[in-house]
Amino acid sequence: MRLAVIPGDGIGPEVVTEALKVLGEVAPSAEITNYDLGASRWHATGELLPESVLGELREHDAILLGAVGDPTVPSGILERGLLLRLRFELDHHVNLRPGRLYPGVRSPLADPGEIDLLVVREGTEGPYAGNGGLLRKDTENEIATEVSVNTAFGIRRVVADAFDRAEQRPRKHLTLVHKTNVLEHAGSLWSRIVEEVSLEHPDVTVAYSHVDAATIHLVTDPGRFDVIVTDNLFGDIITDLVAAVTGGIGLAASGNLDITRTNPSMFEPVHGSAPDIAGQNLADPTAAVLSMSLLLDHLGMPEAARRVEASVAFDLATRDQASPGNTQAIGDRLAALVSSNTSQVG
Amino acid sequence: MRLAVIPGDGIGPEVVTEALKVLGEVAPSAEITNYDLGASRWHATGELLPESVLGELREHDAILLGAVGDPTVPSGILERGLLLRLRFELDHHVNLRPGRLYPGVRSPLADPGEIDLLVVREGTEGPYAGNGGLLRKDTENEIATEVSVNTAFGIRRVVADAFDRAEQRPRKHLTLVHKTNVLEHAGSLWSRIVEEVSLEHPDVTVAYSHVDAATIHLVTDPGRFDVIVTDNLFGDIITDLVAAVTGGIGLAASGNLDITRTNPSMFEPVHGSAPDIAGQNLADPTAAVLSMSLLLDHLGMPEAARRVEASVAFDLATRDQASPGNTQAIGDRLAALVSSNTSQVG
Ligand SMILES: CC(C)[C@H](C(=O)O)[C@@H](O)C(=O)O
Ligand SMILES: CC(C)[C@H](C(=O)O)[C@@H](O)C(=O)O
């Protein structure tokens, strides 16, 4: 396994270190190359993602990204120039975000019930396409547009993947989240494709929820959801809410997948760079470790993936929630758990 | 006061009846005209909002709308052809949605704290502009676009209104909710205008939150928000979440305001037509009554507005939450409370 690692900014390097510690237990022979991208490189050289680096990244089996973003860099520069550019250049069309409330984890909901859902967010189009502009800038008559671009090709591949995943799950239920009553054209295309693809998956039950209503359900009855498939922006919004109700973005993992495997997929904790606690050994590396589990699964090591996830679940159920330990301590604990549960698999 | 009433579909007529009962206590001389719009008219005549009706509506001081939507009508027809058409034709640029957790009301949050916020949602542009289309429909190469249109004119007027409202509130705090790191152009215009307008309101403190992060804050620390100003779609999404954490859309009021007072403003409970419980005297009319309070305030009767809201607050604090009574009983109770607290004001 050739793994490219982008530690990135803020707490990124710290949580990545712990995720690699865990990887060492299940795949000690993995070949790891670090790439220095993010705020400090941009400050030093003005570079965000040089073509040569992008070329090298393409030669890997997968990418692990810590976090990107720093208060010293104007908002949007690193997000669009690095994070989104990677997602688009590497055709990460399936943005996978599981939402599971692990036993022992406190939800902000009074009565969360069981939550075990999976958001399959489109990753390469919609309002993220970057098609927009300004007209008559800095005048009273200025206009800004943002164009959501939705293609049958782009929607079909992510919807097909979502149905495949729903079929593997006990409940076999899929919910399309959109805003079809207002976004008539995009909504029509999404709805028609979900209907078409559903014909090939007669055992998957299908539901629809407007995105606004989905936010209500996610706080009043999150257990109703199994697989959610949705567009790039709605997916961005509801996955943060999903993370919140399942214990916070500190625990939320994600995978940016090219399911054709033409390009390496990229795995990242959702929490961001958290500059306020960076460099202090305070960040919880759990989300990075869970992202590693998604990585292992994607690379054809489902057994190793399950063991990493099971170790996290065990640790979450047994850790002192009030003081779970520092970054390293949690990483050490998870690595030990994985090693005790694992015959090496890679 | 000349009031146009659109009872609409589902539970709309029932909750409107109770809101008018309450209005009778504070403004018995109000002249009320009913307009039959919604699913049944569409079924009978194919009409959604005839020009002649729109013309008549314009002659009123305000509009009270019950609910629009019915399962027998394809999704989007009534929403776009009636509800959104009213908002756009009558230039309802300020969509006002208070989010208050009244004492006695149960939030799905374990520890909601005090919630008393106000979302000022733009109502006439953004992704709701209806600028989009389909290309190569029903082929493998189909493309759907949706264009978010944002004008300096449209943003400035809603931002100015939000600052005015923030200034009236004890905390004097305003949060812009957007997604500036991705929606670069619209985000830039919104941010610049908020900055500009803030110069005229030095006593209002200003914060910014990405929409995804805002959903997290709304379930983990909703008390941080005072006034939120945001675009049409983000406002749609977060106000449903706000409603959920403050006890549900059954209690959520809204006003669609033309703050220039060129056109009548329109007031509606957020809950929708709830066809499953329609006609059974089961719907809670509280949101319609709270919408009436917003109406009274907008029409220059702040004292009456406050008494209606105070009566609702008293009823919510004292009602049997498990069986608050049927539609009529709640309406009777609220009307009695208003009458006992109120010297007639209109
Ligand atoms: C940082 C930002 C560009 C990104 C997104 O909007 O996708 C983040 O919010 C996420 O969800 O991964
Ligand atoms: C019914 C729908 C068109 C409407 C909207 O999207 O604005 C509703 O969700 C609302 O929030 O009033």
Image (tube, coloured by chain):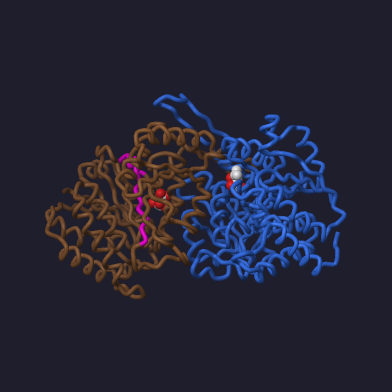
Chain colours: A blue, B brown
| Residue at the image position 43 percent from the left and 48 percent from the top | B235
Question: Magenta stretch: residue B307 in it?
Answer: no
| Residue at the image position 48 percent from the left and 65 percent from the top | A220
Seen from the viewer's position, the closer of residues B236 and A57 is A57
The answer to whether residue A160 shows anywhere in this view is no
| Residue at the image position 15 percent from the left and 53 percent from the top | B30
Picture quadrant of residue B58: top left
Q: In the rendered image of this protein, does residue A123 appear above or below residue A105?
A: above
Seen from the viewer's position, the closer of residues A13 and B320 is A13
Q: Going by the picture, which residue comes out furthest to the right? A: A29
Query: Which region shows up in magenta?
Result: B85-101
Is residue B319 left or right of B144 when viewed as pictured?
left
Q: Position of residue A288 (x, y in %)?
A: 69, 55
Is residue B345 left or right of A326 when viewed as pictured?
left
Picture quadrant of residue A126: top right
Is residue A341 left or right of B247 when viewed as pictured?
right
Seen from the viewer's position, the closer of residues A287 and B266 is A287
Question: Magenta stretch: residue B94 in it?
Answer: yes
Picture quadrant of residue B330: bottom left
Seen from the viewer's position, the closer of residues B15 and B220 is B220
Q: Position of residue A275 (x, y in %)?
A: 61, 46
Q: In the rendered image of this protein, does residue A317 appear above or below residue B125?
A: below
The answer to whether residue B313 shows anywhere in this view is yes
Is residue A244 left or right of A64 when viewed as pictured?
left
Q: Total marks drawn?
A: 0
Q: Going by the picture, which residue comes out furthest to the front? A: A280
Q: Position of residue B208 (x, y in %)?
A: 47, 43
Q: Position of residue B25 (x, y in %)?
A: 16, 60
